[in-house]
Image (spheres, rainbow, N blue to C red):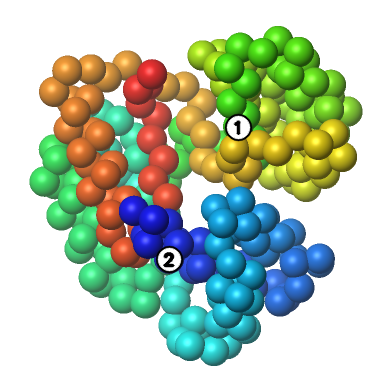
Amino acid sequence: KRAKACTTLIREIALATRSGVADPAVNARLRAAVDKALHANMTKDTIERAIKRGSGADGADNMSELRYEGYGPGGVALIIDCVTDNPVRTVADVRHGLSKHGGNLGTTGSVAFQFTRTGEFVFETNGDAAREEEILEAVLDAGADDVSSADGTSVVLCSPESFESVAAALKVAGLVPGEAETVMRPGTRIAIDGDARETLLDLIDWLEALDDVQDVYHNASLG
């Protein structure tokens, strides 16, 4: 899992570099990818190699970003973001995984309307009311749309456009989130339990284990 996570981060850095410029100071997507990699304890040498790859070396130009949409067990909506040098292989793997777990591949736009691209910062606060208040105050005027706390976790949500300003406000306040990224967040979640829940979890694990899969988003309530 650690090796897969490292590969995913390297690809994101390379693609972020290719989508803009090789300077995190002026490429917001690259800056977010580098911050995420550093948070995951990736070495600076590895990050620099990924940026160099995104600049045109090591076959990065052969990679493309693809998004697949579909349904899993229990009618759960799925968005599967991939990076691949072989789209034929990737779509076959994704289709096989969905079919194997009682789901099916949908057409473009079939489920995306149920999700919104959202900046998300997650903190483990363990019910510390003072820390929760500190997080709220830090992002109140920085562009955050919502701050919620439940089950020992505080989550800050914002638009993708406000991600940088919220991240900067948290940094100034000395608050370091456990996770900070832009995700596809469902408008509502559906309840799923029993065998369908277990099958969905198996499907997500199966998809995330594929080398070409970067992220898997769903609208199931698994709490």
Asked whether disc 1 touches disc 2, contact meaning CB atoms under 8 Å apart, the reply is no
- Residue 142: image quadrant is top right
Name the residue located 14 percent from the left edge and 46 percent from the top edge.
99
**Horizontal arrangement in the rendering, residue 66 relative to residue 1 (left or right):** right
| Amino acid at circle 2 | Thr
Can you say whether 52 is above or below 213 in the image? Answer: below
- Neighbor class of circle 2 (other Cα within 10 Å; few <14, some 14-19, many 20+) is some
Residue 107 in sight in this render: no
- The amino acid pointed to by label 1 is Val
Characterize the local packing of mark 1: few (<14), some (14-19) or many (20 or more) Cα atoms within 10 angstroms. some
Q: Is residue 101 toward the left or the right of residue 111 in the image?
A: left
Whole-percent x, y for residue 24 in the image: 75, 67
Q: In the image, is 98 to the left or to the right of 190?
A: left
Of 34 and 76, which appears nearest the observer? Answer: 34
Q: Secondary structure at mark 2?
A: helix
Q: Secondary structure at mark 1?
A: strand
Give the Cα distance between marks 1 and 2: 23 Å
Q: Which mark is residue 7?
A: 2
Residue 122 is labelled as: 1
Q: Up-down: is 76 above or below 117?
A: above
Q: Nearer the viewer, residue 108 or 68?
A: 68
The percent position of residue 133, horizontal first and vertical second, equals 77, 15
Please give the name of the residue rendered at 32% of the width and 71% of the height, measured from the top-left corner.
87
Asked if residue 135 is positioned above or below residue 67 in the image, the reply reads above
User: 3 or 23: nearer the eye?
Assistant: 3
